[in-house]
Amino acid sequence: MEMRAVYAECMAELMEADRHVLVLDADLSNSTATRKLYPRFPQQMFECGIAEQSMCSIAAGLASYGFKPYIETFAPFASRRICDQIAISVCYAGLNVKIVGTDGGVGAELNGGTHMSVEDIGVLRSIPNLVIFEPADAVQLRAAMPVVNAYDGPVYLRLFRKELPAIFREGYEFDLFGADLLKEGRDLSIFVSGIPTAQALAAAEELEAEGILCEVINVHTIKPIDRETVLASARKTGRVLTVENHNVIGGLHSAVLETLAAERIPCYAVGIEDRFGEVGKLPYLMEAMKLTKNHIVDAAKRAWTQE
């Protein structure tokens, strides 16, 4: 099932249960699959047009009156374009606004380089009071939505719109502030978020066949990062590799490095190497941005062989 379809279903459930839950859209309700919700929830859906800064300010105003607004648009518009509104109108004021940025990094595909937000997490991670969450599959997203909704504060939800390989099983219990151990290991810790999670697991299986036992941990919440889990795994294995669909500057890699700063544990990265995006389908972009299983395997072997 497409991630956006799961997101739309979850929003319908949340709005049905609570009339204070609202959706504000910036002319992208077809892209987010929420357009079909307008007839069902005419008092809870708002089309703001291509005016993302105004949309964020409106959401802040609604939140100040006790509503629970979700604003949704493409990731570059949910981060770069409205950074000041998020920082001042939402986070400085401590308001309960949920920000949904779709298709970060290679998820932009044919939208092209200008719409490929490789820096959205880095832009927003430095803002106080903001939680940053990126689901790895549809099961995790479905389990997370009620938890995210119940959290009283601003959250940035980085959402891939299309289908992703299944990582979690039905019945999975989501902890917003706790990373998920996917595979135990002793030789190398792989911390991964978002789209490349399935690639990281496949890489770990290949490496295991060669005698390198990798511990794979899905870090779905990048801010605040689960320091306890990261430190425990890194101390156990003594080597770390981060994998993310984001610039290696400012995102998961930076968060893990900050956590390990006093540990003297080597930390390597698979991610978008400080460059802008380009036009292409997902398989091409995964290869171009060096996010595939083979890239993870190669990086893991380099980390393993370094003293």
Image (cartoon, grey):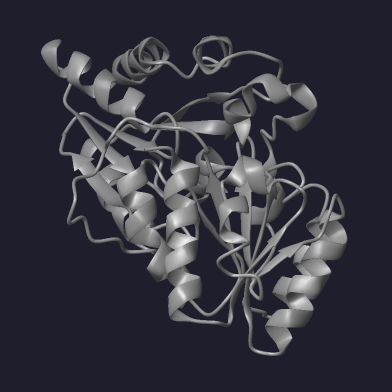
Above or below for 115 versus 84: above
Q: Nearer the viewer, residue 246 or 259?
A: 246
* Quarter placement of the N terminus: top left
Question: Residue 229 placed where, x, y %?
Answer: 30, 54
In the picture provided, is 61 more to the left or to the right than 184?
A: right
Residue at 65% across, 70% down: 42
Residue 209 in view: yes
Q: Relative to 46, say whether 242 is above or below.
A: above
Q: Is residue 139 left or right of residue 59?
A: left
- Please determine whether, in this image, residue 296 is positioned above or below residue 239: above
Q: Residue at x 39, y 52 (%)?
A: 141
In this view, 46 is above or below 93? above
**x 60%, y 36%: residue:** 103
Question: Residue at 52% of width from left, 38% of height from top?
Answer: 160
Residue 88: x %, y % from top left: 81, 71
Asked if residue 93 shows in the view, the reply is no
Give the percent coordinates (x, y) of residue 47. 76, 60
Q: Which sits in the foreground, 121 or 167?
A: 167
Q: From the viewer's perspective, is 106 left or right of 233?
A: right
From this viewpoint, which residue is outermost toward the bottom? 65
Looking at the rendered image, the quarter that the C terminus falls into is: top left
Q: Looking at the picture, how far across and down is residue 120, in whole percent?
A: 68, 44
